[in-house]
Amino acid sequence: NAGVTQTPKFRVLKTGQSMTLLCAQDMNHEYMYWYRQDPGMGLRLIHYSVGEGTTAKGEVPDGYNVSRLKKQNFLLGLESAAPSQTSVYFCASSYHPAGGFQETQYFGPGTRLLVL
Amino acid sequence: KQEVTQIPAALSVPEGENLVLNCSFTDSAIYNLQWFRQDPGKGLTSLLLIQSSQREQTSGRLNASLDKSSGRSTLYIAASQPGDSATYLCAVDGNQFYFGTGTSLTVIP
């Protein structure tokens, strides 16, 4: 079991460039999340998905788009990168049994993004 | 909007000491509260999850409590070890997940 994996690990972009961050999980989890972590701000939820083909906005969705075409993958896209999007991005997944409480989130190792 | 606060922001203790980390939240309408550990340059590892109907959870030397009505949770670490040095984050699950900014713990050998 690889758990939650993220690619790439590190990327440098110029302002205006686009890129896609890939998150993959092999635990058959329904729920997946994208967070960004900034000094002094903690982790903030960007977008999340409660199942294949569904996505929803989190606390800070502006400037990002997401897609969940396959259950195991959750993609985060930056169409036109800005310096304010310099951050560490974490993906997470969790199991949510029908009619039951959500279980713990499992996090990937993170992607460090620098936008110049 | 839910606000999650963790106090203190940093803590340094000698090895073997028992310690308590604090987490407070403003909206008591939560499904659960989780405590995570984050090592430098790494992702988060879940330590304990407390459902809203529970009062505490224990795992080894860790004990987490939840008082929903007062909007507080504590993480108790017994007999601290240098390997416990990390940042500890709490997160509450309401309509969305909200994280605190963490407590950076250093255990001095």
Image: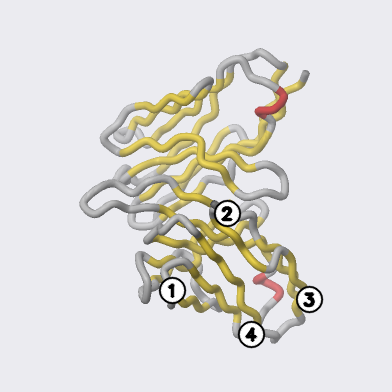
Nearest-to-viewer mark from 4 and 1 = 1
**Quadrant of the snapshot with the C terminus of chain B:** top right
The circle drawn on residue A116 is: 3
Q: Disc 4 designates what residue?
A: A80
| Residue neighbourhood size for the residue with mark 2, other residues' Cα within 10 Å, grouped as few (<14), some (14–19), many (≥20) | few
Q: From mark 3 to mark 1, how far is it between C-alphas?
A: 32 Å
Q: Disc 2 designates what residue?
A: A2
**Quadrant of the snapshot with the N terminus of chain B:** bottom left
Question: Which mark is first along the chain, 2 or 4?
Answer: 2
Residue A76, quarter of picture: bottom right
Question: Which mark is first along the chain, 1 or 3?
Answer: 1
- Dot 4 falls on a residue whose secondary structure is loop
Q: Residue at point 71% right, 63% down?
A: A9
Question: Which mark is first along the chain, 1 or 4?
Answer: 1
Q: From mark 2 to mark 1, how far is it between C-alphas?
A: 17 Å
- Dot 3 falls on a residue whose secondary structure is loop
Residues at circles 4 and 2 in contact by the CB criterion of under 8 Å: no
Labels 4 and 3 within one chain: yes
| Amino acid marked by disc 3 | Leu
| Amino acid marked by disc 1 | Lys
| Residue neighbourhood size for the residue with mark 1, other residues' Cα within 10 Å, grouped as few (<14), some (14–19), many (≥20) | few
Q: From mark 4 to mark 3, how far is it between C-alphas?
A: 12 Å
Labels 2 and 1 within one chain: yes
Question: Which mark is first along the chain, 3 or 4?
Answer: 4
